[in-house]
Amino acid sequence: MSKRVAIIGTRGYPSYYGGFETAVRHVAPALADAGWDVTVYGRPGQERVDDPSLDARITRRTTRGLESRSLSTLTYGLTAVLDAIRRRPDVALVMNCANGHWLPLLKLAGIPTVVNVDGIEWERAKWGRLAKAVFKTGARMTAWTADRLVFDADAIGTYWRREFERDGVVIPYGGTEAPALPLHPEDAHLAGTPFALVVARFVPENTVPEFLVAAERIAQQHPVVIVGSSGYGGELDEHARLLAEAHPNVHWLGHVADDERLFALWQHAGAYFHGHSVGGTNPALVQAMHLGAPMVARDTVYNREVLARTDATFVQPDPDAIADAVLALLGGPAEQRRLGRAVQERAREHYTWRAVCAAYERALAEQAGVPAGLMRVAA
């Protein structure tokens, strides 16, 4: 029996931009393994066509849109939806509820939809009033129109049940195990030294402004490695640049696309600060857990759900509180090892790609009315 799925709303396959792209790199080949004909829609120049992990069974289609911070998701989503309607898959996996504006078109065409609603975008400080309204309206359209909703955390599901009276299935993100890795040659100077690490897109809700202030104190005693950027330049990028120029112990790497380099940093870090505050299960957090990074996390319902009883340190978004917690952890190698083991064990139990891929396939198969082909494991 032919089973055809279109994946809409990411930057393509394989792409390394963010959480949705990470998920697609795992879910698309797994669906192909289960007998699905998989098409992934993407944007020009966002895919790594020379990636050795590229699965030739995946059909990649690039559509056009407006390269705008606030309009790109909507415009690329529309052109992908229109192309998918022409090709008529059995089901569409739609990432991001902003694309809820276009779900009625898929419904009119008789194409069932499974929608990953993402986080609560309209609460993010990086968006202006118009963009927040677009996301909130897209969420309402998703609630009215989607056939099946996917939440990446229980707390996101609770929000949608309260605000939109819609239930769904919880499918988090997974992470990748890795053997012990040496630090990248450019990071070799950090070997044997407890250092602080942050990995985040430079937006206020990721607690980047507070961490950059905290880094000045931390750097007086330990190296600080900052991975990330805004992607558009701006105040936070400038702050990180000036900080790295002024303090020999501060190393700003910008965006790191090399997974092996990033994995090694997580493995060797003495303290990883995770400051994301809006959203559900964060892919970077789950990946850091799989690599045994000792955690200091911003105290949010989402981070507490993922880290649970691992004894990670939770802090308020205050520079002094962040610096105090990170310095305390960097000064305790035994505590670093204990926390690293605890988060790794939790990740292995609750956040594996095998379970994530099987859960997605079950959701898609139910909507398409076809049998699921992957091993039935709990998500």
Image: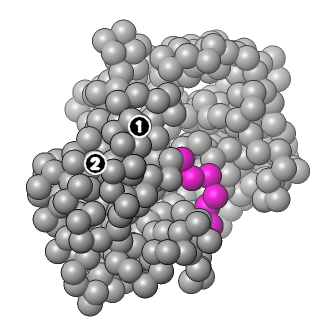
What secondary structure do most residues of the magenta stretch adopt?
Answer: loop
Q: Nearer the viewer, residue 175 or 262?
A: 262
In which quadrant of the rendered view does residue 329 lie? bottom left
Which amino acid, mark 1?
Asp
**Res. 309 in view:** no
Percent x, y for residue 268? 45, 77
Q: Is 302 left or right of 60, judged from the image as shown?
A: left
| Mark 1 vs 2: CB contact within 8 A | no
Q: Which residues are magenta?
A: 255-260
Label 1: how many Cα within 10 Å (few below 14, some 14–19, many 20+): many
**Residue 12, can we see it?**
yes
Picture coordinates of residue 272 (x, y %)?
34, 65
Q: Is residue 290 magenta?
A: no
Query: Crowding at label 2, few (<14), some or many (≥20) Cα neighbours within 10 Å?
Result: many
Q: Quadrant of residue 234?
A: top left
> Residue 232 at what x, y percent from top left?
50, 28
Mark nearer the N terminus (1 vs 2) = 2
Between the C-alphas of marks 1 and 2, the distance is 10 Å
Residue occupied by mark 2: 212
The vertical placement of 328 against 82, above or below, is below
Instruction: Report the residue marked by disc 1.
Output: 237
Say whether residue 276 is left or right of residue 102: left
* Viewer-proximal residue among 370 and 44: 44
